[in-house]
Amino acid sequence: MFQLIDASRVKGVVHGIAVLGVTIGYGKPVKLMDAIEIIAELCNVEPQIVFKEEMKGDVKATWADVSKARKLLGWQPRTKLRDGLEAERRWVKQAMEIGLI
């Protein structure tokens, strides 16, 4: 069993919402375990994953429908998952260094 997720960058989401209330995301699901693998590699950690039984209401797959953004704005996702996660890692590191989080 695996889950699929989608990723969004704040910059893209804010722009989409501000302009027309369109949904912004990468538009393609990615396996959750693949995302965990990338994050672990970027953070140089070995994740301690505990698999549990599914809970009622768990969503097996979710991703953004970006068709309205494409149609109305000619918008296309530009940030690859790995690049977005690396940018987020850098931001969190900097925020921690200055005491923001």
Image (tube, rainbow, N blue to C red):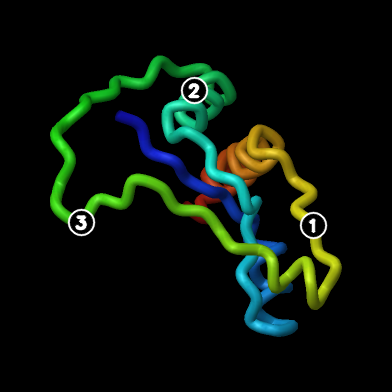
Label 1, label 3: how far apart the Cα atoms are:
31 Å
Residue 40 located left or right of residue 42: left
Around disc 3, counting alpha carbons within 10 Å, would you say few (fewer than 14), some (14 to 19), or many (20 or more)? few
The residue pinned by badge 1 equals 76
Around disc 2, counting alpha carbons within 10 Å, would you say few (fewer than 14), some (14 to 19), or many (20 or more)? some
Foreground pick, 22 / 71: 71
Q: Identify the mark nearer the N-term, 2 or 1.
A: 2
Instruction: Identify the residue at horizontal 79%, vertical 72% (top origin).
Output: 71
Q: Are marks 2 and 1 in contact (CB under 8 Å)?
A: no
Foreground pick, 6 / 43: 6
Type of residue at label 2?
Glu
Foreground pick, 67 / 23: 67
Type of residue at label 1?
Gln
> Could you tell me residue 92's position as x and y percent?
56, 44
Q: Is residue 70 above or below residue 38?
A: below
User: Which label sits in the foreground, 2 or 3?
Assistant: 3
The residue pinned by badge 2 equals 37
- Residue 14 appears in which quarter of the rendering? bottom right
Q: Is residue 50 above or below residue 17?
A: above
The residue pinned by badge 3 equals 57
Instruction: Identify the residue at horizontal 70%, vertical 84% (top origin).
Output: 20
Label 2, label 3: how far apart the Cα atoms are:
25 Å
Q: Is residue 10 above or below residue 22?
A: above
Q: Identify the mark nearer the N-term, 2 or 3.
A: 2
> Could you tell me residue 50's position as x and y percent?
22, 25
SS for callout 3: loop
Residue 7 located left or right of residue 62: right
SS for callout 2: helix
Please give the label number shown on residue 14: none
User: Which label sits in the foreground, 2 or 1?
Assistant: 1
